[in-house]
Amino acid sequence: MDPAATLQHVRAHWAGIQPNSPIYGLFFSGIRIVDARREDVGSAATSGGRILARLPIVPIHVNSKNILHGAVSAALVDWAGGMAIAAATGKNQTGVSVDIHISYVAAARAGDELEIEAWVQRVGRSLAYTSVEIRQVPKAKEGDAAVDANSPVKTRGPVVAAGSHTKYVAFGEAKKAVEAAQTATTDEHKAENTA
């Protein structure tokens, strides 16, 4: 999949999820996916996807200390891992979470903007492994050119949180197998009853 098609697919995948996820709708209504691509790094099992998104921090994202809430960072790791899997596979079924690890490294505050980068380490038959880095977008200094809000930043800001996310991606496959078996059984019964 070419980068433009991958970006279009990931944005469409997000548009399909957002109205059905109250927590994502609450936290991430302002998120923008600015880049998505599939990275071929060998076999189909090791092909990866990478996404880059931007999120302005607003009051709903902060805790009582007025810094980015850990639950928002955890939700970002969850969300971004799934989007990276969508970029890697070209599918809309990105699985369910098995494991999430997060290291909180620095603080970000309301008014700051985050850049979220996620990439797939590996997609296997049943599990996908992703990594996520949440960075603060550097503030423009006087005289600097304005940063395009829909583009990756040229200079990476400080890491706010880093995480890994493992997802069970065969979710739905067992249901499909059961449905296929039921259809086959029904077809056999119909054939027996007409004979």
Image (spheres, rainbow, N blue to C red):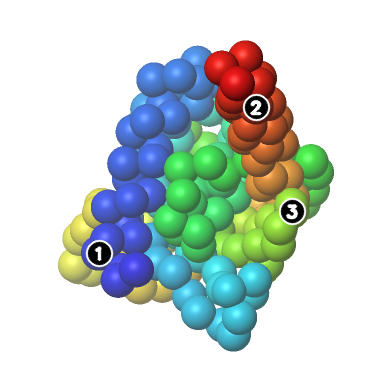
Task: From the image, tell me which residue sits under label 2.
Answer: 188
Return the residue nearer the eye: 136 or 167. 167
Q: Residue at 63% across / 31% down in the picture?
A: 184
Residue 42 position in % (x across, y down) = 59, 85
Q: Residue at 37% across / 31% down in the picture?
A: 16
Q: Residues within 10 Å of mark 1 (few under 14, many from 20)?
A: few
Marks 2,1: beta carbons within 8 A: no
Asked which secondary structure carries label 3, the reply is strand
Q: Residues within 10 Å of mark 3 (few under 14, many from 20)?
A: some
Residue 103 visible at all: yes
Residue 74, above or below 142: above
| Residue type pointed to by label 3 | Leu
Residue at the extreme bottom of the image, as rendered: 42
| Residue type pointed to by label 2 | Glu
State the image quarter where residue 29 is shown.
top left
Residue 102 visible at all: no
Is label 2 or label 1 in front? 2
| Residue type pointed to by label 1 | Ala
Q: Residue at 50% across / 26% down in the picture?
A: 24
Tell me the distance, in whole angstroms, between the alpha carbons under discs 3 and 1.
26 Å
Task: From the image, tell me which residue sits under label 3.
Answer: 127
Residue 193, above or below 164: above
Residue 60 position in % (x across, y down) = 50, 21
| Quadrant of the frame with the C terminus | top right
Return the residue nearer the eye: 117 or 195. 195
Return the residue nearer the eye: 3 or 190. 190
Return the residue nearer the eye: 63 or 115. 115
Tell me the distance, in whole angstroms, between the alpha carbons under discs 2 and 1.
46 Å
Marks 3,1: beta carbons within 8 A: no
Task: From the image, tell me which residue sits under label 1.
Answer: 4
The tag earlier along the polypeptide, 3 or 2, is: 3
